[in-house]
Image (cartoon, helix red, strand yellow):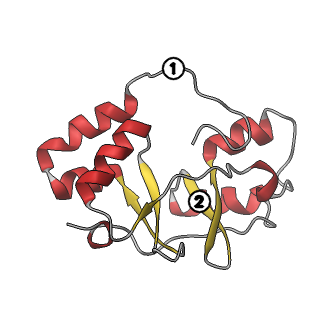
Amino acid sequence: MRVEEIMTAHVHLMRPEQTVEEAAKVMAKHDLGFLPVATEDRLVGIITDRDITVRVIAEGRDGRARIGDVMSDEVKYCYSDQDVEEVRANMGDIQLRRLPVVSREKRLVGIVFLADAARKFDPGATGESLSDVTEARGEHSQEKGKGQ
């Protein structure tokens, strides 16, 4: 089974020049914890609710801060034609619950969630996959571009 068969194709995108307040409103409206950041349909970063907390609020910035100034620009992703099991295992190894999905031309085409990958590939693997992600494996960096 390939990632494109289980991914969520409808993705809310933000642009680097938009404000953190705009991102937070989209997250609140759609109950999201992260948003891909793109220029056109090229993925350039990710902004998470944690980025907003750590890189905006904790640093004394306000909602007018530009997304491009606080987003994580070191983005992990997978390809739409990759094998679901390979991606599920990789997500557990790198401790991510969701990954942007890109075409081989590096155009953003969707999002894959670990729980969906585990459930659709092997329903019994869901707990194991989530356990891999939640297992403590060292320090987490909060520096810009790190910690995704």
Specify the quadrant that holds the N terminus.
Answer: bottom left
Q: How many angstroms separate mark 2 from mark 1 (CA)?
A: 25 Å
Residue 41 is left or right of residue 113, and the answer is: right
From the top left corner, tell me how far across and down residue 83 is, in percent. 26, 61
From the top left corner, tell me how far across and down residue 141 is, in percent. 64, 29
Q: Residue at x 44, y 43 (%)?
A: 96
With respect to residue 65, does 38 lie above or below? Answer: below
With respect to residue 48, does 58 lie above or below? Answer: above
Q: Helix or strand or loop: what does disc 1 sit on?
A: loop
Q: Residue furthest front?
A: 104
Specify the quadrant that holds the C terminus.
Answer: top right
Residue 93 - label: none
The amino acid at mark 1 is: Gly
Instruction: Tell me the crowding category of disc 1: few under 14, some 14 to 19, or many 20 or more residues within 10 angstroms, Cα based.
Output: few
Q: Residue at x 56, y 53 (%)?
A: 34
From the top left corner, tell me how far across and down residue 44 is, in percent. 67, 63
The label nearer to you, 2 versus 1, is: 1
Residue 138 - label: 1
The quadrant where residue 52 appears = top right
Q: First in sequence, mark 2 or 1: give its number.
A: 2
